[in-house]
């Protein structure tokens, strides 16, 4: 069974930065890609970013140029560097991963992934 554990959330001021981390415990399961989603209060969960094992990245339009996703394959770890944070970025952020050999790309990512972390709160407020 795949377990995903997020860390690094908290409070940031508008214009500030936070870095989220997610470590995957895989057992014998191979995963690809890994990604991040978020759910703001009163809204549906939405895709934020994803990265494949070869380093191909995909971002939601709302975070392009501000957020950067990266990955350490040998540590089964994915990061989300969030810069220029806005109050609208306030949400619970979820780490996610797909079983390997599923289709890659936005159309898949928008439907969600196979495995999920429990989520971590990011609050952007002055």
Image: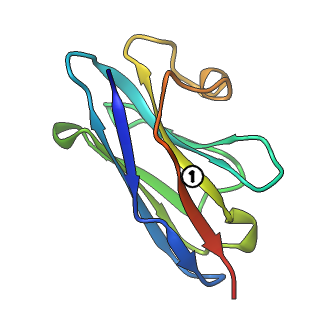
Q: Which residue is mark 1?
A: 93
Q: Residue at x 53, y 45 (%)?
A: 94
Question: Of helix, strand and loop, which one carries label 1?
Answer: strand
Question: Outermost residue toward the left?
Answer: 74
Q: Residue at x 63, y 71 (%)?
A: 123
* x then y, percent, for residue 36: 52, 44
* x then y, percent, for residue 93: 57, 52
Can you tell which quarter of the image residue 113 is in? top right
Q: Residue at x 41, y 29 (%)?
A: 33
Position of 11 with respect to 2 (left or right) is: right
Question: Outermost residue toward the bottom?
Answer: 126
Q: Residue at x 25, y 26 (%)?
A: 26
Closer to the camera, 116 or 99? Answer: 116
Position of 21 with respect to 28 (left or right) is: right
Closer to the camera, 39 or 105? Answer: 39
For label 1, count other residues whose C-alpha is less than 10 Å away and answer few (under 14), some (14-19) or many (20+): many
- Quarter that holds the C terminus: bottom right
């Amino acid at each position: 069974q795949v377990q995903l554990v997020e860390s690094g959330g908290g409070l940031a001021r508008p214009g500030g930065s936070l870095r989220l981390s997610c470590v995957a415990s895989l057992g014998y399961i191979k995963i690809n890609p890994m990604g991040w989603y978020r759910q703001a209060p009163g809204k549906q969960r939405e895709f934020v970013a994803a990265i494949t094992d070869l380093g191909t990245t995909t971002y939601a339009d709302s975070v392009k140029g501000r957020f950067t996703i990266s990955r350490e394959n040998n540590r089964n770890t994915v990061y989300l560097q969030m810069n220029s944070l806005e109050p609208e970025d306030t949400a619970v952020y979820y780490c996610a991963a797909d079983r390997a050999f599923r289709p890659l790309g936005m159309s898949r990512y928008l439907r969600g992934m196979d495995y999920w972390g429990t989520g971590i709160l990011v609050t952007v407020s002055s």
